Image (cartoon, grey):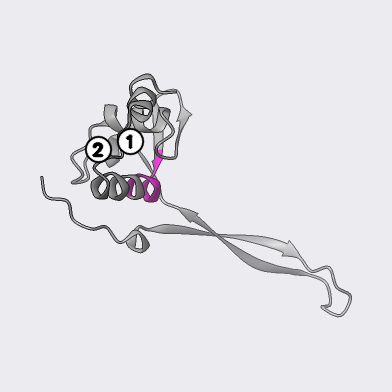
Amino acid sequence: MRVLPVDIRRVPTLGVFQWHKKTCQACGGGYYPVIRIEDAWMRVSEVEKLPLGMSAEVITKLIKGGFVEGCKAAPNSTTVNVASLLEHYEATSEDPEFWTREKLERYRNGI
């Protein structure tokens, strides 16, 4: 399998605006928008369709083992942070010694 470099900056992000109250007297009161940037999150079943060669079971084990950021948002819906998954993919493809015994144990047992 050929591994291509992934530019993490190209992973889509989500910008969420929140309104914050102006606290200084000179500002005249009121509110101003502040953007909060969020990483892209996807359901594991959707990420499985990406050309990474990873099954939903593998991605779920990576989440449970603490290798990638993810959460079980609902009983039948596990989501994964796409940037975290791609960073893990890069790290493991560049380091043949990544999978130590301790890491293999974490992966197998989801600790």
SS assignment at label 1: helix
Left or right of 86? Residue 30 is: right
Residue stretch in magenta:
80-86
For the point 40% across and 47% down, which residue is it? Answer: 84
Which residue is denoted by mark 1 in the rendering?
A: 44
Residue nearest the viewer, comparing 97 with 15: 97
Whole-percent x, y for residue 89 in the image: 29, 46
Question: Residue 65 occupies which quadrant of the picture?
Answer: top left
Question: Answer yes or no: do the residues labelled 1 and 2 have beta carbons within 8 Å?
Answer: yes
The reply to whether the magenta stretch includes residue 108 is no
> How many other residues sit within 10 Å of disc 2, few (<14), some (14-19) or many (≥20)?
some
State the residue lying farthest toward the bottom. Answer: 26
Q: Looking at numbered disc 1 in the image, what kind of residue is underneath it?
A: Val
The reply to whether the magenta stretch includes residue 83 is yes
Which image quadrant: the N terminus? top left
Q: Main secondary structure of the magenta part?
A: helix
Whole-percent x, y for residue 111 in the image: 44, 23
Question: Residue 92 occupies which quadrant of the picture?
Answer: top left
Whole-percent x, y for residue 5 in the image: 23, 58
State the residue lying farthest toward the left. Answer: 1
Which residue is denoted by mark 2 in the rendering?
A: 48
Question: How far apart are labels 1 and 2 at the CA level?
Answer: 6 Å
State the residue lying farthest toward the top. Answer: 109
Classify 83 as above or below 103: below
Left or right of 54? Residue 70 is: right
